[in-house]
Image (spheres, coloured by chain):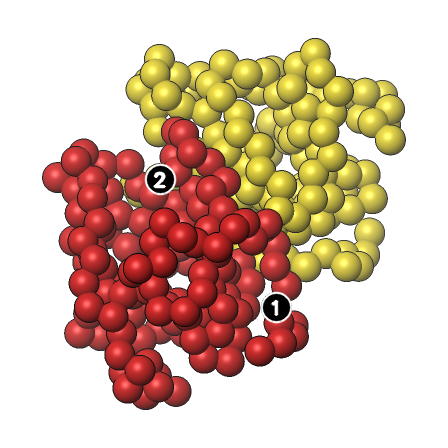
Chain colours: A red, B yellow
Amino acid sequence: MSEGKFREIFERGPENIAYAQYFAGQSYLNILSGEGVVIANVTFEPGCRNNWHIHKADKGGGQILLCTAGRGWFQEWGKPARKLGPGDVVAIPAGMKHWHGAAGDSWFSHLAVEVPGENGSNEWLDPVSDEEYAALG
Amino acid sequence: MSEGKFREIFERGPENIAYAQYFAGQSYLNILSGEGVVIANVTFEPGCRNNWHIHKADKGGGQILLCTAGRGWFQEWGKPARKLGPGDVVAIPAGMKHWHGAAGDSWFSHLAVEVPGENGSNEWLDPVSDEEYAALG
């Protein structure tokens, strides 16, 4: 699909090989800050999204998404999906089951800021099925 | 000055009253995340810049700038100023004397991510003089 009006702000970086097993479709990962606070630019091709997952930590933890380009989705388990676009901010506390990714007809980029925590880890769960995703609308 | 091709990504927020005494010119401050990791969107009108300052902390601390719109400057004390534009990232460790702001002929926005630290504080120093600033080119 053409990138059309997708105005990327941060460098896209390489294919996201490290987390590819937890994503449907192609994403790209560019680590902008690896120390102090870990910040990555994540870019999703149209239709690409990550599996349901949970950021775990004994204290603190979680992730903040800062949307910079294109259109996408965020969904917390049990709630309606939320449309995302440039300028949107999503605070994801530790323990919240969720997924995020591009819209079906648009590229999407967000910065992901890792909130420091104690004994942090990620729990990766089921993919968002094609049926669930297609129904987002 | 017209905002011309300045493509703001994050909401500008109100006038930056809290830090106005440490800035030359008008800036705007929008706190995007106030807990976990503090993240603000800072927007500078053309010519606006902050004073020389130092982010202090006993451990950790400092700030990461993520540039999203327009054109600006960053300068570390004793070094040439660095031109900034969308997609640029500046890691400012605790203890580094520096300033940042817009170019003379452009609006400028960056996200400022506070790196958590122990006993953090800001030391505000002299303004960047009009002569220094005009000489940047």
In the picture, measured across the screen, residue A72 lies left or right of residue A129, that is: right
Residue at 39% of width from left, 38% of height from top? Answer: A38
Asked if A137 appears above or below B61 in the picture, the reply is: below
Between B23 and B134, the one nearer to me in the picture: B134
Residue A78 visible (yes or no): yes
Residue at 31% of width from left, 41% of height from top? Answer: A115
Residue B17 visible (yes or no): no
In the picture, measured across the screen, residue B60 lies left or right of residue B95, that is: left
Location of mark 1 (residue): A6
Asked if A72 appears above or below B49 in the picture, the reply is: below
Residue at 57% of width from left, 20% of height from top? Answer: B53
Location of mark 2 (residue): B37
Q: Which amino acid type is marked by label 2?
A: Val
Q: How many marks?
A: 2
Q: Chain of mark 2?
A: B
Q: Which amino acid type is marked by label 1?
A: Phe
Between A88 and A61, the one nearer to me in the picture: A61
Q: Are marks 2 and 1 on the same chain?
A: no
Q: Position of residue A84 (x, y in %)?
A: 44, 69
